[in-house]
Image (cartoon, rainbow, N blue to C red):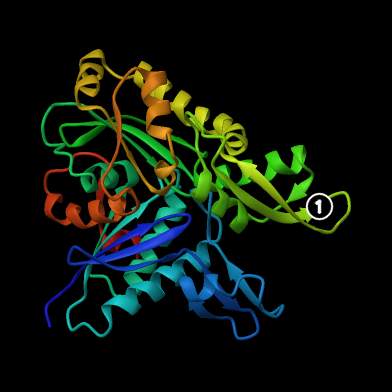
Amino acid sequence: MAAMDIGIDLGTANIIVTMDGKIIVNEPTAVAYNSKKREIIAVGREAHNMLGKTPDYITVVKPLKDGVISDREITMMMIREFVRKVSGNLMIKPQIIICVPSSVTDVENRAVIEAALSAGARKVWLIKEPIAAILGAGVDITKASGSMVVDIGGGTSDVAVVSFNGIVASSTLKMAGNKFDRAIIKYFGNRDKILVGEKTAEQVKREIGCVYDPDPTVTTLLKGRNLLRGLPQALEINQSDVYEALLPSAMEIVNQVKTLIETTPPELVGDILSSGIILTGGGAMLRGLDRLISCNVSAPCRLADDPLSCVARGTAIAFGCADTLLDGFERVSMYKYK
């Protein structure tokens, strides 16, 4: 059997695994751990479905929080399980490219690399999210022309200007999909004294979430617990309500884009005006975010095709660019981590 090329998008909310350019796994970044037996009993969607439904000795862990690996050992075990899940019993060890959040430390990078090697990797590369995102969006970064990408995931938002196979300027903001959910929880908790869970907040965001030109006739039911009476309550809310909850968080991303443009060479800013700003990641699908950025930055802004899988597709594409990428892409020498 031939060797396989495996790409892993290690996200805060989801882990996406590609094999030979095709998406094989797209599941929540979650692990169910049995503390009595000291072993993993489930990963991905199966583990996520166990949230709040397990005995004390089984813990469901989300090992990445706000773009940071919060549990190194669990992350290693999760990567190992997913690699073994997709590679099976290959005769030849696979090559693996892992896309990691921009804010991970060297120690966390080492944990990810060791996990891939222990799962049977022949070669390991690390790629930064902005590079993977812009490759997945179909942008040709080989030319000396600037392109800006804003990748909004579950835990972090990465903003970068890329030109001639390298990152010219970049920044990471811990404001993304999960923070939007928390903003909804906080807003309605303060205003209406109703407490909702993260899953409910995420559902509201997907149904009627908006950060530009809201329509007050679009409504949904918000179900939770009344903080004053301690009893269940259902409240009808409209898009304008959710707009008020989400706008301050969205403006943090807008301001980060503005700040990065201020530090970008003027020649590349001119390129960005021509080519526009590309939005990728699940958080970028929030209604009106592209128009909000465009109006405040005075540059065209568009949502990439299939923004959810852009980073994963870019990770797969990177196998063919290993010899040309100048920045944000690193082949890890195996002996260095033994």
How far from the left and from the top, in percent, is residue 215? 52, 34
Place residue 110 in its image quadrant.
Answer: bottom left
Question: Going by the picture, which residue comes out furthest to the top?
Answer: 266
How far from the left and from the top, in percent, is residue 324? 12, 44
- Relative to 7, is 170 on the left or the right? right
How far from the left and from the top, in percent, is residue 125? 26, 56
User: How crowded is the residue under tag 1: few (<14 C-alpha within 10 Å), some, or many (20+)?
Assistant: some
Question: Going by the picture, which residue comes out furthest to the front?
Answer: 217
Which of 317/321 is in front? Answer: 317
Which of 4/184 is in front? Answer: 184
Question: Going by the picture, which residue comes out furthest to the right?
Answer: 229
Count of labels shown? 1
Relative to 27, say whether 12 is above or below: above
Viewport quadrant of the C terminus: bottom left
Relative to 299, say whether 201 is above or below: below
- Relative to 264, is 325 on the left or the right? left
Which of 174/274 is in front? Answer: 274
Place residue 61 in its image quadrant.
Answer: bottom right
Q: Residue at x 18, y 44 (%)?
A: 138
Viewport quadrant of the N terminus: bottom left
Q: Residue at x 19, y 22 (%)?
A: 274
Q: Residue at x 88, y 49 (%)?
A: 228
The residue carrying mark 1 is: 226
How far from the left and from the top, in percent, is residue 306? 29, 50
Relative to 120, say whether 72 is above or below: above
* Residue 171 visible in rendering: no
* Residue 96 visible in rendering: yes
Which of 219/50 is in front? Answer: 219
Q: Amino acid at mark 1?
A: Asn
